[in-house]
């Protein structure tokens, strides 16, 4: 099969393999860390968790980064991306260790959230850097396939990391701190793996006169509008509309995540521990959907174009999400986890490809950083909407229908503009 042949050729690229290893270790550890936080915040027997509490935790962990995210993009376009992976993962290892100490020491919640926030903030530098660096190790012909394999493999690694977290939790008799310490060790491994890449390999290219850090930060106010103008230029408007559609789909994902957490905590299981064990298969099925997206998307994007594939993904979710979500029972919820994993990851692969193809290398760090900010704001906004709508048991027909409508808007958004923009970056 052509896809298998291309995949083999891709994995023969030494620098791509090494960058992929950094991604797998980094995102696998993210899965460990996120499950430990979910277990501590949502499924602790002594905590009476509500949708409002989940939304508040998401806001504390994600919104502050949205204020500094654009500055991170400017820095990513000046710092060596390989150094971001080395020192970023090393810093996360240290911060995860601090979080474990806070978990065991009975520290106040605000101090725990502050530590977790720092880990999340560094994570955004690493993920944006990985996306911006990918075109430096893969030729343009295989960029769609690389975007199918690399981020999807990272998401699968995060799913496996979540499974590892469940295993460590069982061995350590339910100790969330032990799980976080395991994550700290894996972050350290990711840092050491990044050292196998040459410092200048991943870019960005140096300008003859490199500005200092203070000068770079001072220039942010001028450079961000320039990046936005670059993104919305006539030959790049496909990227802008793909980002708009993907942001709407991210909103849907955030709302449904809160719904599933509440269902697992109060409706589909009798105890918090049973609810946490039920969350594991849901994450695994979502990971299987990510894998299916990696297999299907390169084929679909070649035949339909990335923009049309985003339309297909969002329209599929619009139809299947209410059909599977409205029964509020375990079987349909598990099936929905697979479907949403497939369509969300499929649309993200297509969006990443469009943005990478349309945006020049010198702007990629800023654009992908803004991409992350849009994701965070949409995710937290969705959690806030879910908190206003969801009852205590998580059963809400209104929220399920609202999400289906938003998926439909995403499909119409991309369909409305694809004929005008489709293919401009691929001709």
Image: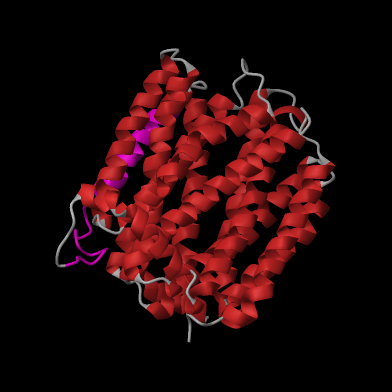
Q: Note whether residue 396 is visible.
A: yes
Q: Which image quadrant for residue 47?
A: top right
View extreme (left): residue = 208
Q: Residue at x 18, y 52 (%)?
A: 212
Percent x, y for residue 27?
43, 48
- Residue 318 vs 161, above or below: the answer is below
Q: Residue at x 74, y 45 (%)?
A: 333
Percent x, y for residue 104?
42, 16
Q: How many numbered marks appear? A: 0
Asked if the stretch drawn in magenta spans residue 239, the answer is: no
Q: Residue at x 70, y 33 (%)?
A: 262
Instruction: Report the span colored magenta.
Output: 179-207
Q: Which image quadrant for residue 368?
A: bottom left
Q: Residue at x 41, y 13 (%)?
A: 105
Instruction: Tell which of 261 and 111 is nearer to you.
Output: 111
Percent x, y for residue 114?
42, 27
């Amino acid at each position: 099969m052509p896809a298998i042949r291309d995949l083999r050729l891709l994995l023969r690229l030494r620098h791509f393999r090494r960058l992929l290893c950094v991604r797998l270790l980094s995102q696998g550890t993210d899965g460990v860390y996120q499950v430990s936080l979910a277990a501590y915040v949502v499924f602790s027997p002594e905590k009476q968790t509500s949708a409002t509490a989940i939304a508040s935790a998401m806001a504390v962990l994600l919104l502050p980064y949205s204020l500094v995210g654009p500055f991170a993009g400017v820095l990513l376009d000046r710092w060596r991306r390989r150094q971001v992976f080395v020192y970023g993962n090393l810093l996360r290892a240290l911060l995860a260790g601090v979080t474990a100490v806070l978990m065991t020491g009975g520290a106040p919640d605000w101090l725990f959230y502050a530590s977790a926030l720092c880990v999340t903030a560094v994570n955004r530098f690493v993920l944006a850097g990985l996306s911006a660096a990918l075109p430096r190790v893969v030729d343009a012909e295989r960029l769609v396939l690389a975007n199918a394999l690399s981020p999807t493999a990272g998401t699968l690694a995060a799913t496996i990391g979540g499974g590892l977290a469940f295993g460590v939790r069982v061995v350590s008799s339910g100790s969330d701190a032990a799980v976080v310490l395991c994550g700290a060790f894996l972050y350290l491994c990711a840092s050491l793996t990044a050292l196998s890449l040459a410092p200048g390999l991943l870019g960005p290219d140096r300008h003859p006169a490199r500005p200092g850090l203070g000068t770079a930060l001072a220039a942010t106010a001028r450079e961000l509008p320039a990046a936005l103008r670059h993104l919305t230029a006539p030959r790049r408007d496909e990227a802008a509309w793909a980002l708009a559609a993907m942001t709407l789909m991210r909103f849907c994902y955030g709302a449904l995540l809160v719904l599933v957490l509440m269902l697992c905590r109060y409706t589909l299981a009798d105890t918090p521990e049973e609810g946490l064990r039920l969350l594991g298969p849901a994450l695994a099925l979502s990971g299987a959907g990510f894998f299916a997206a990696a297999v299907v998307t390169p084929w679909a994007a070649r035949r339909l174009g990335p923009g049309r594939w985003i339309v297909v993904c969002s329209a599929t979710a619009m139809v299947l999400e209410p059909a599977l979500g409205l029964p509020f029972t375990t079987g349909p919820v598990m099936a929905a986890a697979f479907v949403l994993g497939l369509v969300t990851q499929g649309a993200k692969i297509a969006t990443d490809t469009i943005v990478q193809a349309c945006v020049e290398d010198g702007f990629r760090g800023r654009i992908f950083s803004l991409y992350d900010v849009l994701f965070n704001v949409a995710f937290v906004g969705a959690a806030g909407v879910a908190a206003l709508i969801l009852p205590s048991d998580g059963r809400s027909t209104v929220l399920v229908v609202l999400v289906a409508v938003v998926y439909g808007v995403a499909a119409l958004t991309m369909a409305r503009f694809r004929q005008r923009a489709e293919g401009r970056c691929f001709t």
